[in-house]
Image (tube, rainbow, N blue to C red):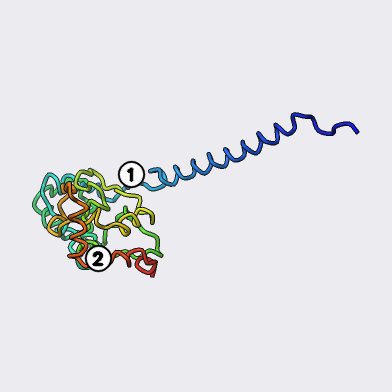
Amino acid sequence: MSQIFHPRTNVYAKLSIVGGVLLAVLLGAAGWFFILSPYSTLVGVAREQPVPFSHRHHVKEVGLECLYCHTSVDEAAFAGIPPVKTCMTCHSQIFTDAPVLEPVRNSYKTGEPLKWTRVNNLADYVYFDHSIHINKGVGCSTCHGQVDEMALTAKGENLYMMWCLDCHRAPEQYVRPLDEVYNMDWQPPADQLAQGKELVAEYGIHVEQLTDCSICHR
């Protein structure tokens, strides 16, 4: 009986299997890179706002502290968006006719709130409490990046679950003294791990509980 398939058929079959596996790996890698890319995460991408508020100007140049605007960040789950009356504390006296601030003045006069675009947004099934992080030594810049250098506010980190777990599994790498929480220039010391372990104990952080699903998913 004559041979049905050409002798090269086995080679083609093996090549197609190897090619299929390589294609699947490449597609998976491409999908992973896309998920982590700024196009997907919006990290570093400034969002359009009703007023082009500059943290760099207000924090770095003017010297305002985080708590001046985000008054509830150490007491509540939500950091809080400052009401326009906070803005008008200064802008009723300086830049009173600046066209860019017209939405602020109009909101103050009419009582109609400004509709800010959310920059750092978590899924509805994720519970996050700002106050517990602030009071356990997690600095603003750890999650939000160098906001004090942003002319327009952008996301500092991707806020994916795997990113959160890096800290929850090893908080000693990230916690800092409480009096440094709002310091945007703070850098981890050379002995961060040793100091961090001491702070974890001092703050009463129970590391074994931090990866419990119910901590963030309630």
In the rendering, at what x and y percent does residue 55 appear?
A: 20, 48
Mark 2: secondary structure:
loop
Mark 1: secondary structure:
loop
Which residue is the site of mark 2? Answer: 205
Q: Which mark is residue 86?
A: none
On the rendered image, what quadrant is the N terminus found in? top right
Nearer-the-camera pick, 16 or 87? 16
Nearer-the-camera pick, 135 or 104? 135
Residue at x 26% of width, y 51% of height: 144
In the rendering, at what x and y percent does residue 97 appear?
A: 15, 47
Amino acid type indicated by mark 1: Val
Q: Which mark is residue 45?
A: 1
Residue at x 28% of width, y 51% of height: 50
In the rendering, at what x and y percent does residue 188 appear?
A: 19, 48
Nearer-the-camera pick, 114 or 110? 114
Pointer 1 or 2: first along the chain: 1
Relative to residue 159, is residue 21 drawn left or right? Answer: right
